[in-house]
């Protein structure tokens, strides 16, 4: 089967077997920030942005991504520059083992793109689908609040 | 100190926040075979016959392995000291299966889909055997779960007792009989899952020299190498184990879970192989925290000082006993290392059942100790009419105290004498009392549907296993005064690579970014027992400090030679002669490499300690009980910990902040129910509920000022200690809120409702 969509800013045509999930495809393309944690959409480690919404790639079948805009964490930073959320995760020590970090950052970016006011409850809601066994969510929430509030104050998205 | 005690960017931080391919599975292996295990659907059975012909006939199946492919050899999957303290009771594949999830066979195929399809084509004829799911009944079940022949180290095969311990100091019975006040209670702690988000994953291949490379998510690379060599009967020197970044472990990866299986596939086929557990396999076929039932008795004199502590342990070690003895030893040792009492006794049995296998999980027996001990201490305080904080302050060990249990109870054998050089538990209690608003909340009148309460608990842990845990480090200098630090120590996501780099940087007067860390590769780094027993900062950290000091001494010697002076010293990153001449570290190295007095400046060291200074923690939990539904919500946890000198404040906080929800999960949200066939029924994260961001209470995390003279720069351990006290703090808070005493975890709302009705 073939499907066309936008992946990290580039139009791609993917050939895939029926039943292939987006997670399997992306990891097969060596986009390894998409982690495999549970296969059931429960842990959020495989979260990607689909049209700017954070979704679990393990639950998305490839034939459904036609025409969609998919983003993974690989597209967030350049060789020189980190995304503001990556910077604040680094500064706050919010990545402990780092396995759920990509999914968390994507969920927070999706929240940011919604454009609503940012408070702690919203950040916690945004991260509620990203299970983390290391941090107790304390430093990820702190990193998110500092960055996303700063982004609001600057009057634009981060 | 310039680096120690300061936050620093993690050495792996950039890679992690960028989502770089740094974990085990983040690579492509050409011609890789996918390996799947057929797990037993039956809790106890003999395999009468096993027909793999249909599976083998499936296109894409390359190899099928059953017990017939391996000669009977018994080993243990526990990655711990050698010779192992626990029983050797497991085979790579056996003709008998002993729990739902046990290995029956495994298959290597060209794709995961084919492997999954093929395991269902294996025809197995089982002869069902009687099974037992209760540790107490198992001892008199009348059938043995393990054979006597071939196994070793099982305490009593016929009674299904994997391990037994007895220890007594003084005369506990006499002391209890003479006590002004005596109390007792029976408590139990449940099966709990480690629930690391990265599943167990291992890759193997043969390198250009036909050596077996194992890239695996493990806490114990050197134990993996030793055990795989033994099980597959190849020399240790033919194996290289590489540990990349690990996506959480918490003890679950202190186990040789599947490395020998993929190793067998690669050795047989010559091809790379990959095995990864699904979440479902993680939940029913990996390892769990040992449930324990503890009967505990406490005697007090008229001044409310402890005269006797007696604990009796019944540990369910599940179908095999990889950590059976040592988890039980830790339960006893930690329960008897908190409070000073002249008469102490512990005895216990670790008993086989046909349930999942107990493994290593953060705390390693200590949460099982402190839930009962701290629950009963709370009851005592209420009974005696004294403040629970004050009762603890009165009875905790103090600086200079001897902890006598440490000498008689070590890691499955006699231990070593222990004197407390640092213990700031009183400071932890006092600070927590203020931060939690203890005095006001404790006595606040409660009425209405939602009732609040506050509870306290204290705990200790250790810093490595005395006389056993050994870590080594190697440091070499480069031209720009950067240093390669090579360590066997295993960063399992905690940040230990960074902490160890900080120690090296502090010694060498350089910034942390000058330390290039490479760890946990059995070909490239020296030996280390691995990341468990809270050993890395204390044991491996001291090895790093010693290696850096050796390296620094060599820099000074080279500097003196190059300056041609007898008397010189190091100031910052220069060697300064008594005559005022200077030479920079960088120039020393460049000259030493290329022009004068040529040599590699380097240092190496090993460290083993007969001390294991306990870190201590006081936890205060504020809860709200819904008296209509019986559900409990934790509002706030204040956790104050004595970890000696802090190496990296943010990373230390992170350890505490992560441990608390694990403890709260054990108390409130993580349930492991089994059906009447011994099948665990919560097979996904939806039903096995670990704390989410929305479940979290407010956390207040502080550290007491402390210095441990035997630790590197005064440090003790931090990894495990914060998981021990929150659960009893929560249940004590429930009692404070609604007067219901929880003695069996996890907390069941039904019990709260029923007992509130009775009250």
Image (tube, coloured by chain):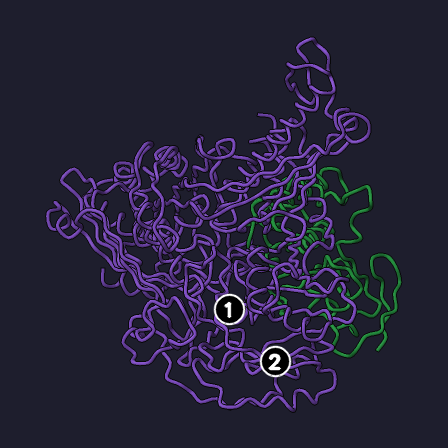
In-front residue for pair B392/B515: B515
Image position of B189 (left or right of A13): left
Q: Secondary structure at mark 2?
A: strand
Q: Which residue is mark 2?
A: B65
Question: Which of A72/B63 is in front?
Answer: B63
Say which residue label 1 marks.
Answer: B687
Q: CA distance from mark 1 to mark 2?
A: 33 Å
Residue B399 placement: quadrant: top left
Colour assigned to chain B in the rendering is purple
Percent x, y of residue B201: 63, 64
Q: Chain of mark 1?
A: B
Q: Residues within 10 Å of mark 2 (few under 14, many from 20)?
A: some
Asked whether residue A45 is in view, the answer is: no
Would you say B688 lies left or right of B349 here?
A: right
Tell which subunit mark 2 falls on: B
Horizontally, residue A25 falls left or right of residue B387, namely: right
Question: Which quarter of the rendered picture does the C terminus of chain B lie within?
Answer: bottom left
The quadrant holding residue B430 is: top left
Residue A140 position (above or below residue B62):
above
Q: Colour of chain A?
A: green
Do marks 1 and 2 share a subunit? Answer: yes
Which residue corresponds to the image point at 34% horizontal and 36% vertical from the top-left? B419
Among all residues in the image, which is located at the extreme left?
A: B178
Q: How many marks?
A: 2
In the image shown, does A98 or B178 lie closer to the viewer?
B178
**Above or below: residue B475 compared with residue B34:** above
Q: Residue B178, how many percent across, how many down?
A: 10, 47
Q: Is residue B501 visible?
A: yes
């Amino acid at each position: 089967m073939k499907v066309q969509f936008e992946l990290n800013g580039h139009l791609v045509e993917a050939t895939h077997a029926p039943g292939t999930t987006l997670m399997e495809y992306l990891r097969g393309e060596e986009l390894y920030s998409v982690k495999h944690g549970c296969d059931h959409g429960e842990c959020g480690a495989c979260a990607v942005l689909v049209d700017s919404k954070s979704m679990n790639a393990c639950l998305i079948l490839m034939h459904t991504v036609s025409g969609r805009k998919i983003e993974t964490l690989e597209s967030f930073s350049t060789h020189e520059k980190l995304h503001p959320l990556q910077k604040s995760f680094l500064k706050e020590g919010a990545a402990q083992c780092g396995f759920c970090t990509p999914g968390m950052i994507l969920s927070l970016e999706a929240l940011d793109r919604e454009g609503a006011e940012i408070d702690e409850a919203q950040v916690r809601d945004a991260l509620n689908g990203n299970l983390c066994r290391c941090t107790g969510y304390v430093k990820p929430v702190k990193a998110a609040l500092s960055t996303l509030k700063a982004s609001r104050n600057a009057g634009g998205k981060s | 100190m310039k680096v120690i005690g300061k936050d620093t960017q993690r050495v792996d931080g950039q890679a992690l926040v960028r989502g770089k391919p740094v974990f085990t599975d983040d690579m492509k292996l050409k011609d890789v075979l996918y390996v799947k295990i057929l797990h037993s659907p039956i809790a106890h059975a003999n395999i009468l016959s096993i027909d793999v012909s249909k599976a083998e006939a499936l296109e894409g199946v390359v190899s099928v392995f059953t017990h017939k492919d391996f000669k009977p050899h018994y080993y243990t999957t526990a990655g711990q000291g050698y010779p192992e303290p626990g029983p050797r009771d497991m085979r790579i594949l056996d003709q008998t299966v002993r729990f739902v999830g046990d290995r029956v066979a495994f298959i290597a195929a060209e794709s995961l889909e084919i492997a999954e399809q093929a395991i269902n084509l294996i025809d197995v004829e089982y002869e069902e055997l009687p099974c037992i799911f209760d540790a107490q009944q198992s001892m008199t079940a009348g059938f043995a779960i393990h054979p006597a022949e071939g196994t070793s180290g099982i305490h009593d095969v016929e009674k299904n007792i994997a391990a037994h311990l007895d220890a007594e100091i003084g005369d506990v019975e006499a002391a209890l009989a003479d006590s002004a006040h005596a109390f007792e209670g029976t408590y139990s702690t449940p099966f709990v899952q480690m629930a690391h988000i990265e599943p167990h994953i291992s890759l193997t291949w043969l390198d250009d020299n036909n050596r077996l490379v194992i890239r695996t998510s493990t806490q114990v690379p050197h134990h993996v190498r030793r055990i795989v060599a033994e099980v597959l009967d190849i020399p240790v020197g033919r194996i290289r184990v590489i540990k990349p970044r690990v996506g959480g472990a918490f003890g679950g990866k202190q186990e040789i879970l599947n490395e020998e299986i993929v190793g067998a596939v690669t050795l047989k086929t010559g091809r790379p192989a990959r095995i990864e557990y699904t979440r479902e396999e993680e939940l029913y076929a990996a390892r769990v925290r040992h449930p324990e039932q503890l009967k505990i008795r406490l005697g007090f004199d008229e001044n409310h000082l402890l005269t006797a502590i007696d604990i009796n342990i019944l540990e369910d070690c599940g179908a095999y006993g990889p950590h059976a003895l040592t988890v039980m030893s830790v339960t006893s040792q930690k329960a008897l290392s908190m409070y000073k009492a002249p008469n102490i006794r512990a005895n216990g049995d670790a008993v086989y059942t046909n349930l999942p296998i107990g493994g290593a999980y953060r705390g390693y027996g200590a949460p099982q100790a402190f839930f009962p001990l701290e629950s009963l201490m709370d009851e005592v305080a209420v009974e005696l009419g004294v403040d629970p904080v004050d009762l603890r302050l009165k009875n905790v060990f103090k600086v200079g105290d001897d902890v006598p249990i440490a000498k008689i109870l070590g890691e499955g054998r006699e231990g070593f004498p222990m004197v407390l050089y640092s213990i700031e538990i009183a400071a932890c209690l006092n600070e927590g009392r203020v931060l939690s608003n203890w005095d006001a909340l404790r006595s606040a009148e409660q009425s209405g549907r939602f009732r609040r309460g506050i509870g306290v608990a204290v705990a200790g842990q250790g810093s490595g296993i005395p006389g056993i845990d050994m870590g080594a480090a190697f440091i070499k200098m480069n031209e720009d005064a950067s240093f390669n630090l090579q360590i066997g120590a295993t960063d399992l996501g905690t940040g230990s690579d960074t902490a160890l780099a900080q120690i090296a940087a502090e010694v060498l007067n350089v910034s942390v970014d000058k330390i290039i860390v490479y760890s946990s590769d059995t070909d490239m780094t020296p030996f280390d027992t691995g990341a468990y027993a809270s050993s890395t900062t204390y044991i491996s950290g001291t090895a790093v400090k010693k290696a850096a000091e050796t390296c620094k001494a060599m820099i000074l010697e080279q500097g003196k030679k190059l300056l041609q002076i007898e008397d010189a010293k190091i100031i910052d990153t220069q060697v300064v002669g008594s005559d005022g001449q200077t030479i920079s570290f960088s120039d020393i190295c460049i000259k030493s490499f290329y022009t004068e007095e040529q040599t590699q400046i380097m240092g190496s060291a090993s460290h083993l300690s007969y001390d294991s200074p306990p870190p201590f923690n006081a936890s205060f939990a504020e809860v709200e009980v819904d008296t209509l539904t019986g559900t409990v919500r934790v509002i706030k946890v204040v956790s104050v910990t004595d970890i000696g000198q802090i190496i990296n404040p943010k990373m230390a906080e992170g350890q505490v902040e992560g441990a608390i929800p694990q403890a709260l999960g054990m108390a409130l949200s993580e349930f492991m129910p089994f059906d009447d066939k011994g099948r665990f029924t919560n097979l996904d994260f939806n039903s096995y509920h670990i704390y989410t961001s929305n479940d979290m209470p407010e956390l207040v995390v502080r550290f007491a000022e402390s210095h441990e003279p035997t630790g590197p720069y005064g440090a003790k351990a931090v990894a495990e200690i914060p998981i021990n006290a929150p659960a009893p703090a929560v249940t004590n808070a429930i009692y404070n809120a609604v007067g219901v005493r929880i003695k069996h975890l996890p907390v069941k709302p039904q019990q709260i409702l029923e007992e509130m009705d009775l009250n």
